Image (cartoon, rainbow, N blue to C red):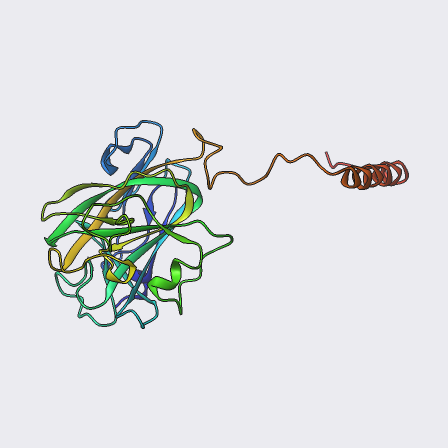
Amino acid sequence: MNNNLKKIALAGCVALGLSASGAALATGSHDCGNGGTSNPDCYSWEFKYYAVDNSESVDASAAAWSNLNSSSTLQTAYLGTYSGGLGVTNVGESGSSPNHAVDNAGYIDSVLFSFSEAVNLDSMQVGYVYGDSDFTVMAYMGTGSPVMAGETYSDLLSNGWKLVGAGTPGYGNGSGDAGHYDGDSSKGTRNFANDLFSSYWLIGALNAQLGANDNKDGNDYFKILALAGCDCTKTPNAAGCLETTDEVPEPGTLLLLGAGLFGLLRFNARYPLRFAA
């Protein structure tokens, strides 16, 4: 299989990469209608392999991960693009339909979306379903970049990842069903409203390793056609948007700062700055 399927780059709210045929993919816009919300102040990312639009400004990438059981660590998988959206083929699958979808038949597949700035994702559009489309969502609230390789899904909860939202009653382990959502056999919008902002989001098939009841409706197979969400422009004080604090410096800090400024002034007096024309 073509290694270009391992990672798909999104530029300007758009997925840019290669499908199995080598074609460029995806369109994007600042109107979130395709992702499932009518909020005109947020973004949508649409994953199709027959059109490109570089009009937006939030860059991102997508990569596929999968593992076999609770003791098996995460490993990279192939990320393919189809008319129904993004699908995953892991090392235990042939790549034939429906196994190239995001599924939990044996291995549990997920797609990691990495954005150039913190965003709040609140819905996705599913362009393909086989059987059922229950799903699990997580957001990374830790520091730095998340480590995926060598971790189990349950390890992620101890390393900065958070299950998103209250989920759907009956899909978890009795602890609020956080992160686990009910789908159905139809294509369309899947909402997971929340107030989290992160540069890293993990969306996968319903995940029993994170507390979901995977026997409720059988195995899940779907492809992710679009995402919708907002950046920090409208809510700069939201969790995940703040990069600095407004704390008042201690007196000792002020003295050091003053001494530093004095030294800088003396330096500039002896060595004036020069700017090229």
Asked if residue 121 lies left or right of residue 225, the reply is right
Asked if residue 257 lies left or right of residue 101, the reply is right
Is residue 42 shown to the viewer in this render? yes
At a point 26% along the width and 53% down the height, the residue shown is 23
Q: Residue furthest front?
A: 174
Residue 267 location in percent, x, y?
Answer: 87, 41
The answer to which of 162 and 240 lies nearer the viewer is 162
Asked if residue 36 lies left or right of residue 159, the reply is left
From what the image shows, is residue 15 above or below residue 71?
above
The answer to which of 16 and 244 lies nearer the viewer is 244
Res 75 quadrant in image:
bottom left
Location of the N terminus (image quadrant):
bottom left
At a point 37% along the width and 37% down the height, the residue shown is 195
From what the image shows, is residue 180 above or below residue 78?
above
Residue 141 location in percent, x, y?
Answer: 44, 49
Is residue 49 shown to the viewer in this render? no
The answer to which of 22 and 186 lies nearer the viewer is 186
From what the image shows, is residue 105 above or below residue 173?
below
Res 58 quadrant in image:
top left
Residue 204 location in percent, x, y?
Answer: 26, 55
The answer to which of 118 and 9 lies nearer the viewer is 118
Q: Residue furthest top?
A: 40
Residue 8 location in percent, x, y?
Answer: 33, 54
